[in-house]
Amino acid sequence: METADELLRGPGPAALLTLDGTVVELNEAMAAALGRPSEQCAGRGFSDLWPPGRRAAPRELVSHAAAGKSVAMRVLDFAWPAGAAATSSIELTEARQVRNPSGHGSRVWLHALDVRNDVSGLLIPFCTDARTARLGVLTYSAGDHSLEWLGGAPSVGAIFPESAMPLDRVLASVHPEDRETVRRMLDLPSPRSPWTTVRYRAPDSDWHRLGVRTRRIRLGHDGPSTTLGLVRDDTREGSRRPRRQTALLAERQRAREVADFSAALVAAATEQELQQVVLTRLAATFGASGALLALVDDGGRLRVLSDAGAGTREVDAVDGADLDAPSPLPEAIRTGRPQFVSDRRDYTRRWPRAAELPRLTRLGPDQAFAIAPLGEGGDQPLGGFMVACGSGRRLSLKDRTLMATLADLAGQALGRIRLQQARVRLAVTLQEAMLPALPEHLAGLEVAARYRPSGHGLDIGGDWYDAYVMPDGTVALGIGDVQGHDVDAAAFMGQVSLSMRAIAGQDPDPGTVLTRTNQLLATLDHSRFASCAMLRIDPRDGQVTGTSAGHVPLLYARKDGSHTVHQLPGGPVLGIVAETEYGEGTFVLDRDSALVMVTDGLVEGPGLSLDAGLDRAGELAAAAVHDGLDAERIADRIVEAAGAADHDDDQTVLVIRRA
């Protein structure tokens, strides 16, 4: 069971609530998102911390998680009250029940999800609400000075000739007296503006009186900031666009939404990302009140996730259900045939065993469902998704066909993701079989290692680590990174690590070990090279002797919460220059301090320099040492933080803590 600290540790907003929605604990990111000090949040209802008029969404999200064991996720607009000085954030937030970390019973765990691969999904609720309110939605990019039409009411969108236009072109159609007003609204000195009238002349049309309001938002807790605009056409009826033009724009807007949905499904790289794409887009695509995604687990039962728009009765009735259950969702998944239920009478007529599921028979009489399986069913069905419609809305034949197509595309994406996961598991198994078991019960020392593959299918080899006790009682530790990720790299990795072990058994000095290993590797007919670092530690007095062959610097984390980046002496990577002599350095590892050895994939990546990555890993390690964590938990913290960043290489860490 995870502790409260572990549940709240992530970089994004997170909170633990009672089942009735009272805040028990929250992290600083959640307090910042709510725009309140932490002490003003604890003990209050989570939805009560939101401005009036915006409390329904967080309340529904929490109630879905509290009502059952299924997972719910929804986009939450952490809009601050008028007058707030900071930029508010839009977060895709997940809610689920967890065991109470500090006692009996359950808690609701709320936490923001990583949406970097589908940021545009965060804006879908704005477009849906704007369409209902007959408003248009656009965004302004200050970087390239352009406006993009996102959606909303087609009658408003028809005013603009293109979906994306440079600011200068838009201003050319704005009345000269209103152009400076538009510039000020887009370059907001405050997070939001009041409704302002702007005169705008559409191509081949008269002047329009537009009501415009803008606000500055952040898309995700660590995402980009943008200016969001709402547009209302206040022009009198006689000047409105022809219906044909509005209908054409509606069709184009619909086609764009479907294309974006399809592209997001294809781009999803993990099952979590696929779930997020489906649950942020599905209901909006079909004008439904809610949606759920059901996946078949290894035991043949349904694991249900919802967008908190579908009623809790629908969710609870099918969560955990067997595929043979008398219900349309399991039947659609089992048979591979879509199911469309027009109302409660239709449901009980076609599934006469519905009495076995009384929660479904209590649904409203006009509740309709559309269900599409993720694939053709058969021996290994994947799952399906469902949209719920109320107030007499029914999907057209065209919508039903589109839903089946999207479900098939989602099934293909899920199959691809799971195949990739199987390949990664195989690669990890092969890699771990080649890595040594760490020595246990070292007097005065704790040693822990973590290895996380890049996730590029069957790419194996690359990183390695080693630790062993020498005959004189000292402990030898090594870490390295072989050029390439294939079978040859794995074989070369084995040659490097085994050579170092064999040579250390004869002469344990790290400089000598690397010098002789390099001489051996240089004589082989091999195009590979490897970086590595080696330490020899005396656990009795903490004396450390170390050397490096072109490897990433060492991190030294101290009990007082400080850290240093320690560059070991040595020489170039192994296997290139045969006559290299590798020098050594010595220092002392203090008690209650730790050394952290890493490979470059853990501290360097797109958008993250090596120096910045080392500094971040050092801060994490120092904080963990200061908190009194052991080597295992220190290693976990560092690897988890690296996993939250956009790293695309193998990640390895070896932690040595002197107790």
Image (cartoon, grey):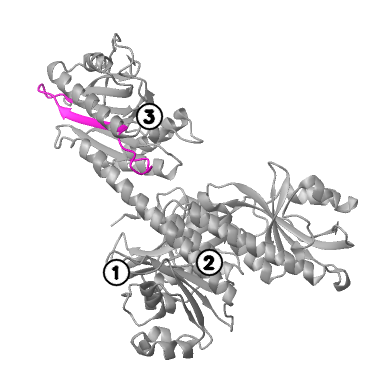
Q: Could you say which disc has been placed on residue 563 in the image?
A: 3
User: Which residue: 9% across, 23% down?
Assistant: 471
| Helix, strand or loop for disc 2 | helix
Disc 1 from disc 2: Cα separation? 24 Å
The residue lying toward the viewer, choosing from 192 and 176, is 176
User: Residue, x 43% and y 59% (percent of image)?
Assistant: 412
Amino acid type assigned to the residue bearing label 1 in the image:
Gly
Q: Which mark is residue 282?
A: 2
**Label pair 3/2, CB-CB below 8 angstroms:** no
Residue 589 in picture, x, y percent from top left: 26, 25
**Would you say 522 lies left or right of 318 here?**
left
In the rendered image, which quarter is residue 352 located in? bottom left
Residue that label 1 marks = 300
| Residue 595 in view here | no
N-terminal of the pair, mark 3 or mark 2, is 2
Eyeballing the image, is 34 above or below 363? above
**Visible residue check, residue 577:** yes
Q: Is residue 515 above or below residue 614?
A: above
Residue 644: image location, x then y, percent? 43, 45
Query: Is label 1 in contact with label 2 (beta carbons under 8 Å)?
Result: no
Residue 542 lies in quadrant: top left
Q: Between marks 3 and 2, how big is the CA–CA gap?
A: 48 Å
Q: Which one is in front in this view, the residue at disc 3 or the one at disc 2? A: 2
Q: What span is colored magenta in the figure?
A: 453-475
Dot 3 alpha-carbon crowd within 10 angstroms: few under 14, some 14 to 19, many 20 or more? many
Residue 107 in the figure: left or right of residue 631: right
Looking at the rendered structure, the kind of residue marked 3 is His
Marks 1 and 3, how far apart at CA: 50 Å
Q: Quadrant of the N terminus?
A: bottom left
